[in-house]
Amino acid sequence: MAMAWTMILSPPSSYSSFHTALVLPSLRPLSNSTLPFRTFTKKKTLNSWRPLSVSASASSGLRALIFDCDGVILESEHLHRQAYNDAFAHFNVRCTTSPEPLNWGSDFYDVLQNQIGGGKPKMRWYFKEHGWPSSTIFETPPEDDESRAKLIDTLQDWKTERYKDIIKSGTVEPRPGVLRLMDEAKAAGTLLAVCSAATKSSVVLCLENLIGLERFQGLDCFLAGDDVKLKKPDPSIYLTAAERLDVQGIECLVVEDSVIGLQAATGAGMPCVITYTSSTADQDFNDAIAKYPDLSNVRLKDLEQLHQKVATTK
């Protein structure tokens, strides 16, 4: 059955290895103009943004529960890093500072993936900082925008397919408590959504394999990085989800694992709980309404009570 993934879905009638010697400098935002992503949101929601105040005049009830995917539904950081490094090795990607194929180490990637959302922006930032590489795609480092975009696209496409192979291996499981919480929300009539900055095809594969086809097709909204122009921490993806679910930000509760996800949620006026991972545990989550090591002991009623307190004090 053909599905328009950017539309609301309804149930059918169905990566120690060689560590890079480069030190990650202070990351700075990428120019929005270099990111050629499609957008389905209104232009006014994609400009410079700031956290929205939660309106007390909106309904205080929890109407929508929204999950991030990577880090929330599954522990995926090491899997993505492995896939990137495999892509760099496959295409013999070499930056001018190293005689060996590029290899992102664990500590480096933890910082990188927690500050820049999306695979293409990660690579584009890295190559801008450390020099565009030679590879089997381009024997000499690409100099024009079109060639650089082709390099990024080719690497990302291969990486995505490699990541899919890892997911399909059957060795990856959802994080504790995720499936039960999704089922509780669905049974209670709470709208259920997944909003991920990752490539759509890889998120679809993850969800079909980890939460099951029936739960995936039962989502009330599903959005991936392909569906918005600006990546987290910009709130575009959550603003778009609220529009498609026909709810106000205060009527939603977001489950995230990182500070960039938290910033995206609060920027959309949505309360957010954190289920942190080993790579995000030390981040500043002061703006979250709760923080958990996982969801194994978190029930829907707990989230409803947390949400109610926030909604009535704003």
Image: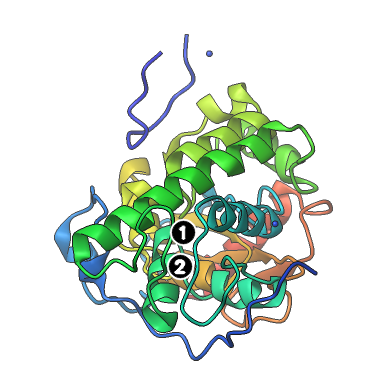
- Eyeballing the image, is 2 above or below 67? above
Picture residue at 46% right of the left edge, 55% below the top: 197
Element class at badge 2: helix
Residue annotated with mark 2: 122
Picture residue at 64% right of the left edge, 54% below the top: 304
Residue 180, image x, y percentages: 75, 38
Q: Is residue 61 left or right of residue 148?
A: right
Q: Quadrant of the N terminus?
A: top left
Quick one: 65 or 174, which is closer to the camera? Answer: 174
Q: CA distance from mark 1 to mark 2?
A: 5 Å
Query: What colour-coding does the image apply?
Result: rainbow
Quick one: 31 or 220, which is closer to the camera? Answer: 31
- Eyeballing the image, is 193 above or below 309? above
Residue 271, image x, y percentages: 52, 66
Quick one: 164 or 282, which is closer to the camera? Answer: 164
Picture residue at 37% right of the left edge, 57% below the top: 152
Circle 2: residue type: Lys
Q: Are marks 1 and 2 in contact (CB under 8 Å)?
A: yes
Q: How dense is the environment of label 2, judged by Cα within 10 Å: few (below 14), some, or many (20 and up)?
A: some
- Eyeballing the image, is 241 above or below 274? above
Q: Is residue 41 visible?
A: yes
Element class at badge 1: helix
Q: How dense is the environment of label 1, judged by Cα within 10 Å: few (below 14), some, or many (20 and up)?
A: many
Residue 313, image x, y percentages: 53, 75
Circle 1: residue type: Gly
Residue annotated with mark 1: 119
Outermost residue, bottom direction? 26
Outermost residue, left direction? 43
